[in-house]
Image: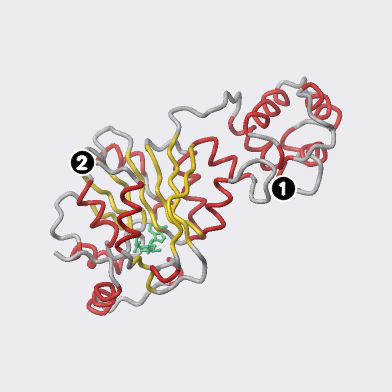
């Protein structure tokens, strides 16, 4: 069967099934074979792998994944696309199509059932407004996975990869870099999709660490510290953290910990590394709390 990744074949399929594209599901379909090859290469899919594809659409990337993987679990929210997927993937017996919203799917169970007990590889080209919640849900729920290769809005890829002290550095950079090593794979122009999105896209691979690169006493507290530090970007770290009641620390206590760490009292959160945030959060957690 001829693969789908071209404008002609995509339009034919959409017409054949009278598919009207759903804006609410962010439906922009990939039509560039070169980019499809690059994504599947970047995901390092081998014949032993189970791949979880989120948002298969009409099955364009699914075909490429099914050629290389042991099996593919494709989770698509739009029920109108299920008959299309059953058709475009009919020559593969290693694809399971699931009609569900990924954010409401019991991924532990599905991976257990189809993944043969090994961590899966995740591939996705999703609506950009749900990309970050999905990535964070995969990490925070400790889904057994090796890597996530995902198309994101260019600016989001820049934020995920950003280093301390740069304008793109923030809570998302630290959250991603706590769980995984981010690497930008390829920039994707709008002309590679039907219909053309009005933003530039980038494929990024997040290779999950077996264990986080820092020793954190309390993950939830670390992320509360990080969020408070970037919530009020223009404030000093002391003021930002003291203004977050959930942390339960006052200005003097924060200033004391910063001094212990050899950091200036007027420092801003955007210059701290993940290691420094970890030390800060571990120390603040152990400041004796006032009764
Ligand atoms: N992967 C296909 C491709 O590259 O051509 C389609 C990409 S399109 C940008 C995004 C796809 O994700 C659509 O098919 C859409 O219906 C699906 N989708 C959107 N939200 C979803 C969700 N919450 N769970 C599962 N699939 C979703």
Q: Earlier in the sequence, mark 1 or mark 2?
A: 2
Q: Is residue 85 left or right of residue 218?
A: left
Nearest the viewer among 234 and 231 is 234
Q: Which residue is mark 1?
A: 231
Pinpoint residue 279: horizontal percent, then vertical percent. 67, 25
Residue displayed at 46% across by 38% down: 141
Q: Quadrant of the C terminus?
A: top right
The image quadrant of residue 264 is: top right
Q: Is residue 27 left or right of residue 221?
A: left
Residue displayed at 31% across by 43% down: 44
Q: Secondary structure at mark 2?
A: loop
Q: Quadrant of the N terminus?
A: bottom left
- Disc 1 from disc 2: Cα separation: 44 Å
Q: Which residue is mark 2?
A: 47
Residue displayed at 13% across by 58% down: 91
Q: Is residue 291 visible?
A: no
Q: How packed is label 2: few (under 14 Cα within 10 Å), some, or many (20 or more)?
A: few
Q: Secondary structure at mark 1?
A: helix
């Amino acid at each position: 069967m001829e693969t789908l990744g071209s404008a002609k074949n995509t339009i034919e399929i959409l017409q054949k099934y009278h598919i009207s594209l759903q804006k609410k599901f962010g439906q922009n379909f990939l039509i560039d074979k070169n980019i499809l090859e690059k994504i599947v290469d970047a995901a390092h899919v081998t014949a032993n792998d189970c791949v979880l594809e989120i948002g298969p659409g009409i099955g364009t990337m699914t075909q490429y994944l099914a050629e290389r993987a042991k099996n593919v679990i494709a989770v698509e929210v739009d029920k109108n696309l299920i008959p299309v997927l059953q058709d475009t993937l009919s020559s593969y017996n290693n694809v399971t199509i699931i009609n569900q919203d990924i954010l409401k799917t019991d991924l532990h169970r599905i991976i257990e059932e189809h993944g043969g007990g090994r961590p899966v590889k995740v591939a996705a080209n999703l609506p950009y407004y749900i990309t970050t919640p999905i990535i964070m849900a995969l990490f925070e729920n400790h889904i057994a996975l090796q890597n996530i290769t995902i198309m994101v809005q260019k600016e989001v890829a820049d934020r995920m990869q950003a280093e301390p002290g740069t304008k793109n550095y923030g809570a998302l950079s630290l959250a991603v870099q706590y769980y995984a090593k981010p690497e930008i794979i390829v920039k994707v122009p709008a002309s590679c999709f039907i219909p053309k999105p009005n933003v530039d896209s980038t494929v990024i691979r997040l290779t999950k660490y077996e264990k986080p690169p820092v020793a954190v006493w309390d993950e939830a507290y670390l992320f509360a510290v990080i969020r408070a530090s970037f919530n009020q970007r223009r404030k000093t770290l002391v003021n930002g953290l003291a203004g977050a009641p959930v942390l339960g620390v006052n200005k003097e206590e924060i200033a004391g910990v910063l001094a212990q760490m050899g950091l200036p009292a007027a420092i801003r959160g955007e210059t701290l590394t993940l290691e420094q945030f970890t030390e800060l959060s571990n120390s603040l957690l152990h400041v004796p709390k006032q009764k």
